[in-house]
Image (tube, grey):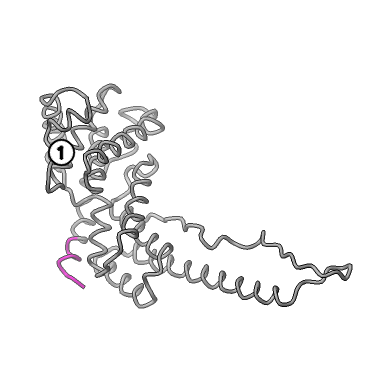
Amino acid sequence: MDLSLAEQLATIFKTEYLYLPSAEKISALQGQWYLDSYRTSVVTWLQQISCILELDEQTLSLACNLCDRMLCVQRFDASKILHLAQSCLLLAAKLTETEIPSVFEFVEVCRLGDSQSIVEMESFVLRVLNWKVSSSCTAIHVARLLARLLGMNLKAYALKKVYSEIRRLEASSMHVGIPSSSLGIETFLSVLLNGFSLVCASDVRAIESALKECGVEFCADSVAGLHVNRALRTDNCASQAKRRKIEQKIPDIDNSGCRNDEFDSRSESNCDSPVSIRFGSN
């Protein structure tokens, strides 16, 4: 295991509380209306702007984090929240992107105010958050770090699935305030263990060991639980397939003595149903 990567994860677990928004504080400052409906619109808008500017997944994740944290400590009129989101996205891009879009590009794409107003809001965000804007404390970064820690060269479609699921969860107000380590690691492992045949029992033991060394016992326990769940579902599917083959060779005989070749499949479980993600606590 790469000790430098393990140390990076361990550091994130110890310091991420400094970068967590609070759903309770947002509710108190902005009213429940923001969490119930308006936040979804803000995140959707940020996703659209990120797509147009071709920004990285982590940039979007960090922008949502910064926006939520600002709303925890500062009240904004509804008409100004998109202006805040715009500046948070620009700030996030400066921290994560190798090719940073110019302020003028943001003005042209977002069509919210001028360059001066964007820069002024960006400075305001930095002052209010006391410059605590780490790009490492996002669920996307944690998931990427975990993949490197485990030495997994995941294919593009697998990572795309992980990022898509993290985006979906981050867009939900229910997950505001969830530690990035929990969101990133357990989403990554849930997709990996239940959606793709990329790991075996020895891989699972290696994952558990790596997470325990980083000091996240709750995630290590989740790995074992997810793997057992997948194994049970796989055995169940195999048993059903074997039973169907036998039944096809020996059709049922109903009470009237007539052959009945139709089999009731309503009781069969859905082998592709997703496993719910359990978030632990630090």
Q: Secondary structure at mark 1?
A: helix
Above or below, 256 against 108 in this view is below
* Residue 145 quadrant: bottom left
Above or below, 53 against 204 in this view is above
The N terminus appears in which quarter of the rendering? Answer: bottom left
The C terminus appears in which quarter of the rendering? Answer: bottom left
The image position of residue 97, as x and y in percent, is 15, 47
110 left or right of 186?
left
Q: Which residue is mark 1?
A: 91
* Residue 68 quadrant: top left
Where are the magenta residues, as a range? 1-8
Closer-to-camera residue (197/25): 197
The residue that appears at 15% across and 38% down in the rendered structure is 91
| Residue type, numbered disc 1 | Leu
Above or below, 180 against 172 in this view is below
The residue that appears at 30% across and 37% down in the rendered structure is 48
Main SS type for the magenta part? helix
Closer-to-camera residue (260/177): 260
